[in-house]
Amino acid sequence: MPKRFVFFILLVLASALVAKGAETVVPLILDVTVNTQQTQITINGDGFGTKFPKVLLGTTTLTVTSSTNTSIQATLPGGLVAGAYLVTVQNESSHLLALFTAVVGQIGPSGPAGPQGPSGPQGAVGPNGVAGSTGPAGAVGPTGPAGPTGPAGSTSAAAICGALYPNLPAAYCAAAPTTPKLVFLTKNTFNGNLGGVVGADAKCQTEAEAAGLPGTYKAWLSDSLGNSPSITFTQSTVPYVTPDPSLTHVAENWSGLVSGALEAEIDYAANGTLLTKYSETYGIWTGTNPDGTASAQNCSNWTDGTSGTGKGDLGIPLDYSNGVWSYAEATNPNCSSQYGPNALYCFKQ
């Protein structure tokens, strides 16, 4: 059975000059029926004229087999493939045209998209448009559920400190939130090869963390490379204290620390243990003057632990009321620890 396809009409009218008294005939196509099995096309409409009109399917002129003013039959060309074609009918008297789009056969599905072509050059940025008005504020969302209530007193700084650092002496957390700066001696002792100042800082940090002390710790140590407490330390405005239960004051602040005289001896380990041997004559590697600047001897910037001739300046905790706690001028053992090995002072930053 032939399939009938009816589409929108594209009508083109062209004006023409005709002889005086002659009638202008305008052709009109209403529908087109294509029978591919019988290779026949039927065109219905009006104004086709009494002469055989000229009929084109696309650009191919068809052979008209019969024609009236309202109907045309023509033969389709061989090898016609399915698709949409423009049908043109020209009235042979007025030479005016009627156009119509017809579909021959079934149109197959679209093939896959081809590769994207290269992007064209970016056009110039246009001017900004006028800013729109601000929209209305959205509705306020519902309030979320309240969190669980903590135990009584848990919001205090001292309680939080105690929960975070259970190994700290109770007096330390009781001083929160104006927590002082802790100062301690290392329990371990070393020869002059400390791995440089950075290695000594790491030794202090390790013992602080093992004792549960929070914060960052540095060794009271100087070299000839520009490292010294006067340069690298945070200069505290709160007291320096030892980690014993009483939080014994060593100095009220940085100014007191570098004044030359301390308020108390630095002789407690990070865990609050009293290191009694340092109340005698044992030394602490420092290479540092009481004011925090570098002194002369530093065991080759604290990398020499075997030389019998290299020297390193040290301090003695027992003599805290004068500058000897940092620099014992008459005692500078060789780097292989002739009078040691020696510990380190560690300060919280």
Image (tube, grey):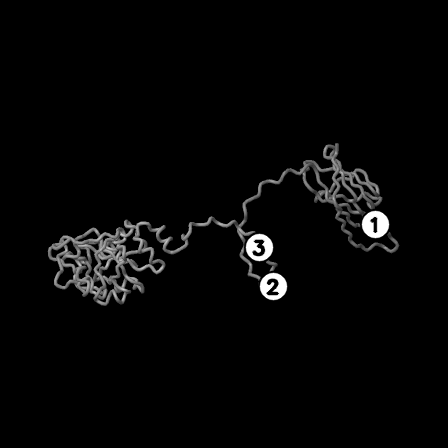
Q: Between marks 2 and 3, how big is the CA–CA gap?
A: 29 Å
Q: Amino acid at mark 2?
A: Val
Q: Mark 3, residues whose alpha carbon is within 10 Å: few (<14), some, or many (≥20)?
A: few
| Residue at numbered disc 2 | 130
Residue that appears at 74% across and 43% down: 7
Instruction: Choose between 63 and 284: the one closer to the eye.
Output: 284
Q: Are marks 1 and 2 in contact (CB under 8 Å)?
A: no
Q: Earlier in the sequence, mark 2 or mark 3?
A: 2
- x, y (%) of residue 244? 26, 55
Residue that appears at 54% across and 47% down: 116
Q: Amino acid at mark 1?
A: Val
* Quadrant in the picture for residue 303: bottom left
| Residue at numbered disc 1 | 25
Residue that appears at 81% across and 38% down: 66
Q: Are marks 2 and 3 in contact (CB under 8 Å)?
A: no
Compared with 31, 183 (above or below) is: below
| Residue at numbered disc 3 | 140
- x, y (%) of residue 183? 26, 58
Instruction: Choose between 42 and 274: the one closer to the eye.
Output: 274
**67 sits to left or right of 132:** right
Q: Earlier in the sequence, mark 1 or mark 2?
A: 1
